[in-house]
Image: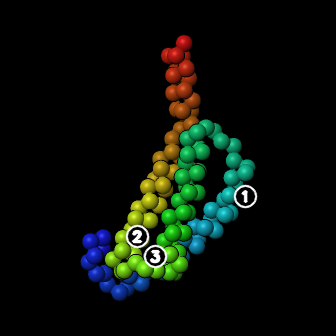
Amino acid sequence: MWRGERSSAGISSASKVLGIIIGIYFAFVVIYLSLNVLPALEWRGLLDEIAVMSYLIGAVPLLGTTLLEIGLVGKNLNDKARRQAHFLLLTVFLILSHVAMIFGMTEPQSQHEHMHHAMEAGR
Protein backbone atom coordinates (compact mmCIF):
# COMPACT_ATOMS: atom_id res chain seq x y z
CA MET A 1 0.00 0.00 0.00
CA TRP A 2 2.89 2.36 0.70
CA ARG A 3 4.22 2.13 -2.85
CA GLY A 4 0.83 2.78 -4.35
CA GLU A 5 -0.46 -0.71 -4.93
CA ARG A 6 -4.23 -0.79 -4.96
CA SER A 7 -5.93 -2.46 -2.05
CA SER A 8 -9.34 -4.04 -2.20
CA ALA A 9 -12.35 -1.81 -1.71
CA GLY A 10 -13.20 -3.65 1.52
CA ILE A 11 -9.79 -3.02 3.04
CA SER A 12 -9.86 0.65 2.03
CA SER A 13 -13.35 1.11 3.47
CA ALA A 14 -12.42 -0.66 6.71
CA SER A 15 -9.26 1.43 7.03
CA LYS A 16 -11.23 4.64 6.54
CA VAL A 17 -13.98 3.72 9.02
CA LEU A 18 -11.54 2.44 11.64
CA GLY A 19 -9.35 5.52 11.20
CA ILE A 20 -12.33 7.71 12.00
CA ILE A 21 -13.59 5.61 14.91
CA ILE A 22 -10.25 5.12 16.64
CA GLY A 23 -9.39 8.83 16.46
CA ILE A 24 -12.70 9.85 18.02
CA TYR A 25 -12.52 7.09 20.65
CA PHE A 26 -8.94 7.94 21.61
CA ALA A 27 -9.81 11.65 21.86
CA PHE A 28 -12.48 10.81 24.45
CA VAL A 29 -10.05 8.54 26.32
CA VAL A 30 -7.44 11.32 26.47
CA ILE A 31 -10.02 13.89 27.60
CA TYR A 32 -11.24 11.55 30.34
CA LEU A 33 -7.72 10.71 31.52
CA SER A 34 -6.65 14.36 31.43
CA LEU A 35 -9.62 15.51 33.50
CA ASN A 36 -10.08 12.61 35.92
CA VAL A 37 -6.85 10.66 36.26
CA LEU A 38 -3.94 12.94 35.42
CA PRO A 39 -4.58 15.48 38.22
CA ALA A 40 -4.59 12.72 40.85
CA LEU A 41 -1.48 10.87 39.67
CA GLU A 42 1.47 10.61 41.98
CA TRP A 43 4.50 10.67 39.74
CA ARG A 44 7.17 8.21 40.80
CA GLY A 45 9.73 9.82 38.58
CA LEU A 46 10.59 11.08 35.14
CA LEU A 47 9.97 7.66 33.58
CA ASP A 48 6.32 7.78 34.65
CA GLU A 49 5.92 11.24 33.18
CA ILE A 50 7.45 10.14 29.87
CA ALA A 51 5.17 7.09 29.75
CA VAL A 52 1.94 8.96 30.46
CA MET A 53 2.71 11.98 28.31
CA SER A 54 3.76 9.93 25.30
CA TYR A 55 0.51 7.96 25.63
CA LEU A 56 -1.55 11.16 25.75
CA ILE A 57 0.38 12.77 22.90
CA GLY A 58 -0.48 9.68 20.85
CA ALA A 59 -3.91 11.25 20.37
CA VAL A 60 -2.42 13.82 18.00
CA PRO A 61 -1.58 11.47 15.12
CA LEU A 62 -4.82 9.53 15.65
CA LEU A 63 -6.83 12.74 15.45
CA GLY A 64 -4.82 13.60 12.35
CA THR A 65 -5.91 10.30 10.84
CA THR A 66 -9.54 11.04 11.66
CA LEU A 67 -9.33 14.52 10.14
CA LEU A 68 -7.66 13.05 7.07
CA GLU A 69 -10.33 10.39 6.64
CA ILE A 70 -13.28 12.75 7.07
CA GLY A 71 -11.69 15.23 4.65
CA LEU A 72 -10.96 18.17 6.93
CA VAL A 73 -7.24 17.98 6.11
CA GLY A 74 -5.50 16.74 2.99
CA LYS A 75 -8.36 17.56 0.63
CA ASN A 76 -5.92 18.10 -2.22
CA LEU A 77 -4.06 14.82 -1.70
CA ASN A 78 -4.41 12.11 -4.30
CA ASP A 79 -5.28 8.60 -3.16
CA LYS A 80 -1.66 7.46 -2.91
CA ALA A 81 -0.57 10.53 -0.91
CA ARG A 82 -3.58 10.15 1.40
CA ARG A 83 -2.68 6.49 2.07
CA GLN A 84 0.92 7.50 2.76
CA ALA A 85 -0.17 10.22 5.18
CA HIS A 86 -2.47 7.72 6.92
CA PHE A 87 0.43 5.25 7.17
CA LEU A 88 2.83 7.89 8.56
CA LEU A 89 0.32 9.08 11.16
CA LEU A 90 -0.29 5.50 12.25
CA THR A 91 3.48 4.93 12.45
CA VAL A 92 3.93 7.99 14.69
CA PHE A 93 1.11 6.74 16.94
CA LEU A 94 2.71 3.29 17.19
CA ILE A 95 6.09 4.79 18.08
CA LEU A 96 4.54 6.95 20.82
CA SER A 97 2.49 4.07 22.20
CA HIS A 98 5.58 1.84 22.33
CA VAL A 99 7.53 4.56 24.14
CA ALA A 100 4.66 4.76 26.63
CA MET A 101 4.63 0.99 27.04
CA ILE A 102 8.40 0.67 27.49
CA PHE A 103 8.70 3.52 30.00
CA GLY A 104 5.52 2.39 31.74
CA MET A 105 7.01 -1.06 32.35
CA THR A 106 10.29 0.32 33.66
CA GLU A 107 10.67 -0.09 37.38
CA PRO A 108 10.80 3.40 38.93
CA GLN A 109 13.27 2.12 41.54
CA SER A 110 15.83 1.49 38.79
CA GLN A 111 15.72 5.18 37.87
CA HIS A 112 16.37 6.19 41.47
CA GLU A 113 19.24 3.70 41.85
CA HIS A 114 20.83 4.96 38.63
CA MET A 115 20.57 8.58 39.80
CA HIS A 116 21.94 7.65 43.25
CA HIS A 117 24.97 5.90 41.71
CA ALA A 118 25.56 8.81 39.38
CA MET A 119 25.47 11.28 42.28
CA GLU A 120 27.89 9.15 44.31
CA ALA A 121 30.27 8.89 41.36
CA GLY A 122 30.31 12.69 41.10
CA ARG A 123 31.54 13.19 44.67
Residue under numbered circle 3: 74
Compared across the picture, whether 11 is left or right of 116 comes to: left
Residue at 28% in and 81% down: 6
Horizontal relation, residue 92 to residue 56: left or right: left
Picture quarter with the N terminus: bottom left
For image coordinates 47% across by 50% down, the residue present is 99
Nearest to N terminus: mark 3 or mark 2: 3
**Spot occupied by residue 14 in the image (x, y as percentages of width and height):** 43, 81
Near-viewer residue (102 or 119): 119
Which residue is identified by label 1? 36
Crowdedness of circle 1 by 10 Å Cα count: few (<14), some, many (20+)? few
Q: Going 41% across and 62% down the picture, which residue do you hit? A: 91
Question: Depth-wise, is mark 1 or mark 2 nearer the camera?
Answer: 2
Single out the mark in the foreground, 3 or 2: 3
Q: CA distance from mark 3 to mark 2?
A: 9 Å
Amino acid type assigned to the residue bearing label 2 in the image:
Ala
Assess whether mark 2 and mark 3 are in contact (beta carbons under 8 angstroms): yes
Q: Is residue 40 above or below residue 118?
A: below
The x and y percentages for residue 27 are 60, 67
Quadrant where the C terminus sits is top right
Residue 71 in view, yes or no: yes
Displayed quadrant of residue 87: bottom left
Task: Judge from the rendering whether residue 98 lies leftward or rightward of residue 30; answer left or right.
Answer: left
Q: Which amino acid type corresponds to the residue marked 1 in the rendered image?
A: Asn
Q: Earlier in the sequence, mark 1 or mark 2?
A: 1
Residue 22 can be seen in this image: no
Which amino acid, mark 3?
Answer: Gly
Q: Is residue 118 above or below residue 104?
A: above
Gap between marks 1 and 3, in whole Å?
34 Å
Q: Secondary structure at mark 3?
A: loop
Q: Which residue is mark 2?
A: 85
